[in-house]
Amino acid sequence: MAAIVETSERATLELLQTHYYKTSYEKLKESYLDILRKLNARIISIDDTYLEIFAETPHMAIQAKIIEQTPVETSIDFYISSEFLFGSKKKAYQFIQTVYDALGKTYELKGLALHIK
């Protein structure tokens, strides 16, 4: 069964709230790409104009949006379509948690959902 999991400023679950890191767009992008490679994800495209990276793992399509708010504040959000027989949302949550954990080891987390309007 397919599931859509999306992170955003207004998410109620802490895991799904936009994460902001103390770094630049380029550094966060490169770290995220390294994480994807370690997870054996297939990188489909990198669009620096729209600040999006598309990737695939078996049974998951992943869109990441990385936005540099200031030179030392960059956010990352995900839109994931996950299709497993069981546990589609759980697998997507695990992917997000893995990425956030890895980024947190490299960059200081400035906060969650910092720009709610």
Image: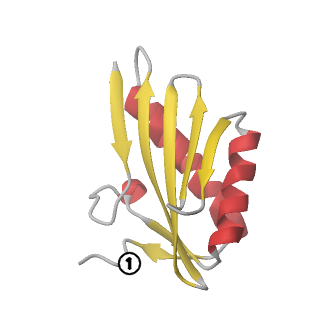
User: Of 48 and 13, which appears nearest the observer?
Assistant: 48
**Residue at the front extreme of this rendering:** 49
Give the color scheme: rainbow, by chain, secondary structure or one colour: secondary structure
Within 10 Å of the Cα at label 1, are there few (<14), some (14-19), or many (20+) other Cα atoms? few
Q: Measuring 49% from the left and 61% from the top, which residue is drawn there?
A: 50
Residue 69 percent coordinates (x, y): 49, 80
Q: Quadrant of residue 84?
A: top left
Residue 4 x, y percent position in the rendering? 34, 36
Q: Which residue is mark 1?
A: 114
The image quarter containing residue 45 is top right
* Residue with the most extreme left position: 117
Check the image and report above or below for 112 versus 15: below
Name the residue: 68% across, 44% down: 36
Q: Considering the numbered disc 1 on the image, is that residue within a helix, a strand or a loop? A: loop
Residue 22 in the image: above or below residue 85: below
Count of marks overlaid on the render: 1
Q: Residue at x 72, y 33 (%)?
A: 40
**94 horizontally vs 13: left or right:** right
Residue 15 in percent (x, y) is at 42, 55
Classify the position of the C terminus by image quarter. Answer: bottom left
Residue 104 or 78: which is nearer the viewer?
78
Rendered-image quadrant of the N terminus? top left
Q: Would you identify the image quadrant in which residue 27 lies?
A: bottom right
Q: Is residue 53 left or right of residue 5?
A: right
Q: Residue drawn 46% across and 76% down?
A: 111
Q: Measured along the vertical axis of the image, is residue 51 above or below residue 91?
A: below
| In the image: residue 12, left or right of residue 83 | left
Where residue 24 sits in the image (x, y, percent)?
Answer: 64, 77
Name which residue type carries label 1. Answer: Leu
